[in-house]
Image: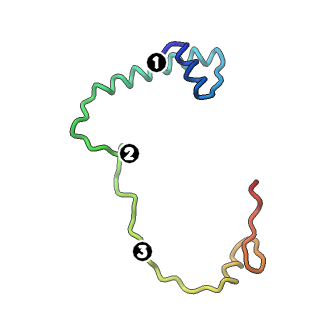
Amino acid sequence: MDRKELETTASLAMLQLHEDEVDTLTDAVTTMLDYFSLMEDVDISGLAPTTHAFIAQESVRDDIIAEVPEVEPKELLSRGPEHDEDHFIIPNVL
Protein backbone atom coordinates (compact mmCIF):
# COMPACT_ATOMS: atom_id res chain seq x y z
CA MET A 1 0.00 0.00 0.00
CA ASP A 2 1.42 3.34 -0.92
CA ARG A 3 1.14 6.54 1.07
CA LYS A 4 -1.75 7.94 -1.00
CA GLU A 5 -3.83 4.76 -0.56
CA LEU A 6 -3.23 4.81 3.19
CA GLU A 7 -4.25 8.46 3.46
CA THR A 8 -7.40 7.77 1.42
CA THR A 9 -8.27 4.75 3.57
CA ALA A 10 -7.67 6.72 6.77
CA SER A 11 -9.87 9.52 5.46
CA LEU A 12 -12.69 7.09 4.64
CA ALA A 13 -12.37 5.64 8.15
CA MET A 14 -12.45 9.20 9.53
CA LEU A 15 -8.99 8.82 11.06
CA GLN A 16 -6.51 11.64 11.35
CA LEU A 17 -2.94 10.45 11.09
CA HIS A 18 0.23 12.37 11.96
CA GLU A 19 3.10 12.37 9.48
CA ASP A 20 5.17 9.90 11.53
CA GLU A 21 2.18 7.55 11.78
CA VAL A 22 1.67 7.55 8.02
CA ASP A 23 5.21 6.28 7.37
CA THR A 24 4.99 3.61 10.06
CA LEU A 25 1.53 2.46 9.06
CA THR A 26 2.37 2.36 5.37
CA ASP A 27 5.08 -0.21 6.09
CA ALA A 28 2.91 -2.15 8.56
CA VAL A 29 -0.12 -2.32 6.27
CA THR A 30 2.05 -3.37 3.33
CA THR A 31 3.47 -6.20 5.45
CA MET A 32 -0.05 -7.31 6.45
CA LEU A 33 -1.29 -7.23 2.85
CA ASP A 34 1.71 -9.28 1.73
CA TYR A 35 0.90 -11.83 4.43
CA PHE A 36 -2.77 -11.94 3.40
CA SER A 37 -1.75 -12.60 -0.19
CA LEU A 38 0.20 -15.66 1.04
CA MET A 39 -2.99 -16.94 2.66
CA GLU A 40 -4.68 -16.95 -0.76
CA ASP A 41 -2.37 -19.80 -1.79
CA VAL A 42 -3.50 -22.10 1.04
CA ASP A 43 -5.71 -24.97 -0.16
CA ILE A 44 -8.91 -24.88 1.88
CA SER A 45 -10.98 -27.19 -0.30
CA GLY A 46 -12.91 -29.65 1.83
CA LEU A 47 -12.77 -27.52 4.97
CA ALA A 48 -16.09 -26.67 6.57
CA PRO A 49 -16.68 -23.00 7.36
CA THR A 50 -16.46 -22.13 11.04
CA THR A 51 -17.08 -19.09 13.17
CA HIS A 52 -14.03 -19.68 15.39
CA ALA A 53 -10.69 -21.32 14.82
CA PHE A 54 -11.02 -23.62 17.83
CA ILE A 55 -14.40 -24.86 18.97
CA ALA A 56 -13.91 -27.19 21.92
CA GLN A 57 -17.59 -27.68 22.60
CA GLU A 58 -20.93 -26.26 21.67
CA SER A 59 -21.60 -23.10 23.65
CA VAL A 60 -25.37 -23.55 23.63
CA ARG A 61 -26.87 -25.47 26.51
CA ASP A 62 -30.28 -26.96 27.03
CA ASP A 63 -32.81 -24.86 28.87
CA ILE A 64 -33.59 -26.48 32.18
CA ILE A 65 -36.64 -25.41 34.10
CA ALA A 66 -35.77 -25.33 37.77
CA GLU A 67 -38.25 -25.11 40.54
CA VAL A 68 -37.86 -21.81 42.31
CA PRO A 69 -39.44 -21.19 45.68
CA GLU A 70 -42.09 -18.50 45.60
CA VAL A 71 -40.91 -15.24 47.12
CA GLU A 72 -42.99 -12.24 48.02
CA PRO A 73 -42.34 -9.13 45.91
CA LYS A 74 -41.56 -7.06 49.03
CA GLU A 75 -38.82 -9.51 49.98
CA LEU A 76 -37.31 -9.29 46.49
CA LEU A 77 -37.37 -5.49 46.67
CA SER A 78 -35.63 -5.59 50.01
CA ARG A 79 -32.68 -7.39 48.39
CA GLY A 80 -31.93 -4.39 46.13
CA PRO A 81 -29.74 -1.48 47.25
CA GLU A 82 -32.55 1.10 46.91
CA HIS A 83 -36.28 0.74 46.45
CA ASP A 84 -39.59 2.43 47.12
CA GLU A 85 -42.99 0.77 47.60
CA ASP A 86 -43.06 -1.19 44.34
CA HIS A 87 -39.89 -0.45 42.35
CA PHE A 88 -36.12 -0.70 42.43
CA ILE A 89 -34.44 2.69 42.29
CA ILE A 90 -31.50 2.91 39.94
CA PRO A 91 -29.12 5.85 39.36
CA ASN A 92 -29.58 8.02 36.29
CA VAL A 93 -27.34 6.94 33.46
CA LEU A 94 -27.46 10.03 31.28
Do the residues under discs 1 and 3 have CB atoms within 8 angstroms? no
Upstream in sequence: badge 1 or badge 3: 1
The circle on residue 64 is 3
Residue 45, compared with residue 3, is above or below; it is below
Residue annotated with mark 2: 52
Task: Classify 10 Å Cα crowding around label 3: few (below 14), some (14-19), many (20 and above).
Answer: few
The circle on residue 30 is 1
The residue type indicated by label 2 comes to His
**Side of 42 relative to 18 (left or right):** left
Residue shown at the point (48%, 83%) measured from the top left: 67
Report, in whole angstroms, how far the alpha carbon at label 1 lies from the one at label 3: 51 Å
- Image quadrant of residue 48? top left
Upstream in sequence: badge 2 or badge 1: 1
Residue shown at the point (44%, 77%) measured from the top left: 65
Q: Secondary structure at mark 2?
A: loop
Report, in whole angstroms, how far the alpha carbon at label 3 lies from the one at label 2: 27 Å
Q: Secondary structure at mark 1?
A: helix
The residue type indicated by label 1 comes to Thr
